[in-house]
């Protein structure tokens, strides 16, 4: 009934907007020129599924973020928290930079690894184009899912200036300005633009006294300068230099934007890290009690009753510093072709701190270990446990294009591409208040290079420390021809060869403290001297063979690993090197028919490619098999672009099917060689998947000044073949929907002692849905303009409905985010000279819980050891599986003022 209620309200808003006759046509169906195929064309003439958003259209209907674009782009999904985009079920499932995204982002022709640029305010961007489906020829670098093309507003020959100001609830202010015009030097124009966006009150209320709220606490600044040159009649150039600065607190990409309504504290443990959550809202005087599910601390998770409440003593902090973005175009116009050189690059330092995922809900009070683990003598655990994550990136891109410009039936484009990237991605986790992590360490003989009398000192109480660095090189040559072989028929043929190389190294150190797995390891068996002390004193696991893989010369090196593991006795780090190459031939072949000026019917085949990579950094411990294979997709698409009713109705349809091979998924998979064996956490390549669907985009102008936009997409993206994969939230495959394929010989500490547990089982995933791929998505906007002589008033209302989706390749209830809907509305007034604009707006008017993607899930059940002398028994702690939902923003509303000069 909620669906009907919201749809009726939206219809009422639209009906109210149609109560006055219009005098002139303002919001018309305009011809939109795009550069999706690297030459200017009308959107309706491009034989590719493209969604495009001009700055004017974004202002009119309220598309201010990338998440808003997903509403009106069939097949597009985006997580603003994780900065991950997907198209038609093909996307990114990790932030490991050694394995890039599957949707290529190009800002003014320069490849970038982040989608953030697409969400720049409209004052910076002329338009954003979303090319759906593999772009294997012209946008070949990791464009297996599609490409997002961002085009900046450029300098003007005449003077132009604009200022904007916005105030929104949660005490958010936005100030923007731009000026453009001649420099006084003949043939040279400039443009300057700036933005400052600051939100002081968070969407998420932290109930711990003295701790900051979170949820879009941002302080973001953008500064951009451009120059445009006309050196001669035939030679022109353009360049841009921009800088970003974030001092965000608990907001921006990477920050907390999730909801975990799990009622219990967590006492599970993993082999290399402490994962202890002693309870929720555990400080006296908070007024929070738990009468239904009391924990040993007598506390409750506040998120159980309110999705936007947390209790945390480790706040998030998001910073972006030293960011410089450069882009340039150099064009020489010959008689029948253009030579174009595009060059640019970026350097930035991104820094994120916060609580670890298992600790994120409420790491507040300490507890005494014997209360839980039963260790003799007593040990107080201070489980304030946080992480530091950094990206230090530099990349440079060069592209050379040679394109025909004549009006003949034969058009061609040739190009060469070169990309270089260097990055560091250090991450470490810290137990802030645990004095034992200042040393000394326990010293079983297997550790500390075996010949030393002491281990390397512990660095700043870090129990996990990983420092990867990598260099990436990508090269390609490509060409595309379009031949109009008959008056209404055209064929397209494109080909690209791409080569990618990645090399670098990774250094890691892993410590163990107060974790049952320490006692379970044979090297730390309690009968050995000092083993019990390992619970009181931290243990260096870095040289433990079951943690860090160190192959011998006789065994050889795993694929992609270019050196044996070495150990630094002074620092305690284990280090190894990586080197691998991937290449592919991709391209496109198409046929299109234009029976009249209003119709385009096309059929197209495209082959997409994404380079392989490594699972290094973030959560790895130099596992045995870090490499992943390249992805490939064969995509078939048919489409119709049609104008009806004397251009009053525009309809774009597309139907597609992909055969998608080797999708890269970070997961646990059972290694099989004739039988089931030890499970490893790796990048897993799903052998085969399919993605198929239908997409509809319509614009209808039934009368002057009244316009409707309607989008619908159906997406069936699923696994076709995958076997032996272990569900991290259900390692024993006990869920009723699981299809186990066997039992490993390796006991699982998370299920040992539980009914039916004590092992890991891989599953057959054939038929499971691909992550973040809702089957159905609907968006409807209606807008009407009253012309009043002295100005105009436009009312706009938007209704969005999105189907349920899953955050994993396991189609399970605990990975499912529910379907949801949302209603937005805005009213825009402009004066008669188009100088002054006032916008009143409300977003998510009914304050519904929306979901940016599918849910994540953690196993919140396991065992803890009970020790009686030299006897260790495992006591089951059964608490369930905790789901974590990525939320869209709550209800927001505000006012925006715009003023144009000159």
Image: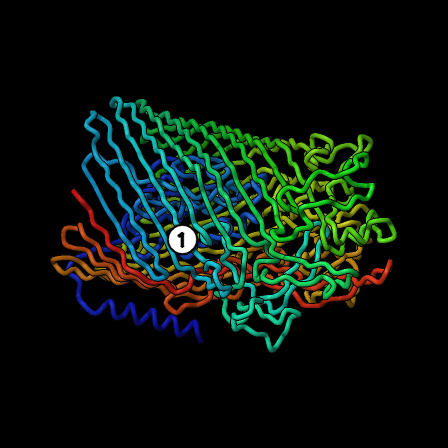
Quadrant position of residue 331: top left
**91, above or below 890, in the image:** above
Q: Residue furthest left?
A: 789
**560, above or below 515, in the image:** above
Q: Please name the residue that numbered disc 1 is placed on.
A: 69
Residue nearest the observer in this picture, 690 or 781: 781
Q: Quadrant of the N terminus?
A: bottom left
Does the rendering let one see residue 85?
A: no
**826, above or below 664, in the image:** below
Residue nearest the observer in this picture, 244 or 374: 374
Q: Is residue 558 left or right of residue 488?
A: right
Quadrant position of residue 863: bottom right
**Measuring 31% from the left and 42% from the top, which residue is drawn there?**
194
Q: Position of residue 665 (x, y in %)?
A: 62, 48
- Assign a secondary structure to mark 1: helix
Does the rendering let one see residue 399?
A: yes
Q: Position of residue 544 (x, y in %)?
A: 77, 43
Residue nearest the observer in this picture, 64 or 128: 64
Residue nearest the observer in this picture, 683 or 785: 683
Q: Is residue 683 left or right of residue 250?
A: right
**Measuring 34% from the left and 33% from the top, which residue is drawn there?**
240
Q: Quadrant of the C terminus?
A: top left
Q: Position of residue 13 (x, y in %)?
A: 29, 69
**Measuring 75% from the left and 53% from the top, which residue is drawn there?**
536
Q: Is residue 555 left or right of residue 739?
A: right
């Amino acid at each position: 009934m909620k669906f009907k209620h919201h749809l009726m309200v939206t219809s009422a808003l639209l009906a109210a907007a149609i109560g006055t006759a219009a005098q002139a046509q303002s919001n018309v169906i305009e011809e939109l020129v795009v550069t999706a195929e690297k030459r200017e064309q009308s959107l309706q003439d491009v034989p590719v599924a493209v969604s495009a958003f001009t700055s004017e259209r974004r202002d009119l209907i309220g598309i201010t973020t990338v998440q808003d674009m997903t509403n009106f782009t069939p097949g597009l999904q985006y997580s603003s928290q994780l900065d991950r985009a997907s198209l038609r079920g093909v996307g990114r499932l990790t932030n490991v930079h050694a394995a890039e995204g599957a949707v290529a982002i190009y800002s003014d022709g320069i490849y970038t690894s982040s989608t953030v640029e697409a969400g720049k305010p409209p004052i910076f961007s002329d338009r954003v184009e979303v090319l759906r489906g593999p772009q294997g020829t012209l946008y070949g670098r990791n464009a297996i899912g599609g490409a997002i093309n961002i085009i900046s507003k450029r300098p003007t020959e005449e003077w132009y200036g604009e200022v904007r100001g916005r105030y929104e609830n949660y005490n958010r202010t936005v100030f923007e300005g731009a000026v453009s015009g001649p420099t006084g030097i003949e043939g040279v124009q400039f443009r300057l633009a700036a933005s400052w966006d600051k939100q002081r009150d968070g969407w998420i209320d932290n109930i711990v006294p003295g701790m900051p709220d979170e949820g879009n606490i941002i302080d973001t600044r953008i500064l951009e300068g451009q120059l445009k040159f006309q050196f001669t009649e035939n030679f022109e150039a353009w360049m841009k230099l921009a800088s970003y600065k974030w001092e965000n607190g608990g907001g921006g990409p990477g920050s907390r934007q999730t909801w975990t309504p799990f009622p219990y504290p967590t006492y599970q443990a993993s082999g290399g890290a402490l994962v202890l959550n002693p309870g929720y809202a555990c400080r006296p005087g908070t007024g929070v009690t738990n009468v239904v599910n009391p924990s040993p601390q007598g506390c409750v998770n506040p998120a159980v009753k309110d999705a936007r409440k947390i209790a945390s003593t480790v706040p998030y902090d998001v910073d972006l510093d030293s960011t410089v973005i450069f882009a340039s175009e150099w064009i020489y116009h010959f008689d029948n072709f253009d030579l174009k050189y595009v060059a640019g690059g970026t350097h930035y330092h991104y820094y994120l701190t916060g609580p670890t995922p298992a600790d994120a809900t409420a790491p507040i009070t300490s507890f005494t270990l014997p209360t839980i683990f039963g260790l003799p003598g007593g040990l107080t655990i201070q489980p304030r446990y946080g992480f530091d994550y950094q990206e230090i990136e530099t990349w440079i891109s060069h592209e050379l294009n040679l394109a025909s410009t004549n009006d003949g039936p034969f058009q061609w484009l040739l190009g060469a591409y070169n990309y270089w990237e260097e990055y560091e991605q250090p991450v470490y986790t810290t137990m802030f208040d645990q004095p034992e992590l200042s040393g000394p360490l326990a010293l079983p003989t297997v550790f500390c290079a075996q010949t030393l009398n002491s281990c390397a000192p512990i660095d700043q109480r870090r129990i996990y420390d990983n420092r990867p660095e990598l260099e990436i090189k990508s090269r390609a040559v490509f060409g595309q021809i379009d031949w109009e072989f008959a008056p209404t028929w055209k064929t397209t043929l494109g080909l690209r060869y791409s080569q990618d190389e990645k090399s670098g190294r990774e250094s890691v150190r892993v410590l163990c403290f107060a974790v049952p797995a320490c006692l379970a390891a044979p090297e730390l068996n309690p009968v050995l001297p000092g083993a019990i002390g390992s619970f009181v004193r931290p243990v260096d696991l870095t040289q433990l063979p079951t943690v860090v893989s160190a192959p011998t010369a006789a065994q050889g090196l795993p694929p992609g690993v270019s050196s044996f593991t070495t150990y630094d006795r002074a620092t305690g780090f284990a280090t190894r090197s990586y080197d691998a190459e991937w290449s592919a031939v991709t391209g496109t072949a198409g046929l299109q028919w234009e029976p009249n000026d209003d119709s385009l019917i096309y059929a197209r085949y495209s082959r997409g490619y994404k380079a392989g990579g490594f699972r290094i950094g973030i959560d790895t411990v130099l596992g045995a098999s870090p490499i992943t294979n390249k992805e490939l997709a064969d995509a078939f698409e048919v489409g119709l672009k049609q104008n009806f009713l004397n251009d009053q109705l525009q309809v774009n349809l597309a139907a597609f099917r992909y055969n998608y091979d080797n999708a890269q998924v970070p997961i646990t998979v059972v290694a099989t060689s004739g039988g089931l064996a030890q499970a490893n956490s790796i990048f897993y390549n799903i052998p085969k998947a399919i993605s198929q669907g239908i997409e509809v985009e319509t614009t209808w102008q039934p009368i002057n000044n009244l316009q409707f936009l309607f989008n619908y997409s159906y997406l069936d993206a699923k696994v076709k073949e995958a076997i032996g994969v272990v569900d991290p939230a259900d390692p024993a495959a006990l869920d009723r929907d699981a299809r186990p394929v066997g039992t490993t010989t390796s006991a699982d500490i998370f299920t040992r002692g539980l009914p039916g547990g004590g092992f890991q089982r891989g599953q057959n995933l054939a038929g499971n849905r691909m992550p973040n791929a809702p089957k159905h998505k609907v968006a409807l906007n209606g807008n009407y303009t009253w012309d009043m002589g002295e100005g105009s008033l436009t009312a706009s209302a938007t209704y969005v409905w999105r189907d349920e989706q899953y955050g994993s390749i396991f189609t399970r209830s605990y990975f499912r985010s529910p379907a949801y809907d949302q209603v937005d509305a805005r009213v825009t007034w402009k004066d008669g000279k188009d100088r002054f604009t006032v916008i009143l707006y409300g977003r998510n008017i009914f304050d519904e819980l929306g979901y940016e993607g599918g849910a994540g899930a953690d196993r919140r059940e396991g065992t803890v050891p009970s020790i009686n002398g030299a006897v260790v028994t495992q006591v089951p702690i059964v608490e369930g599986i905790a789901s974590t939902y990525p939320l869209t923003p709550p209800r927001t509303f505000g006012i925006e003022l715009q003023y144009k000069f000159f």
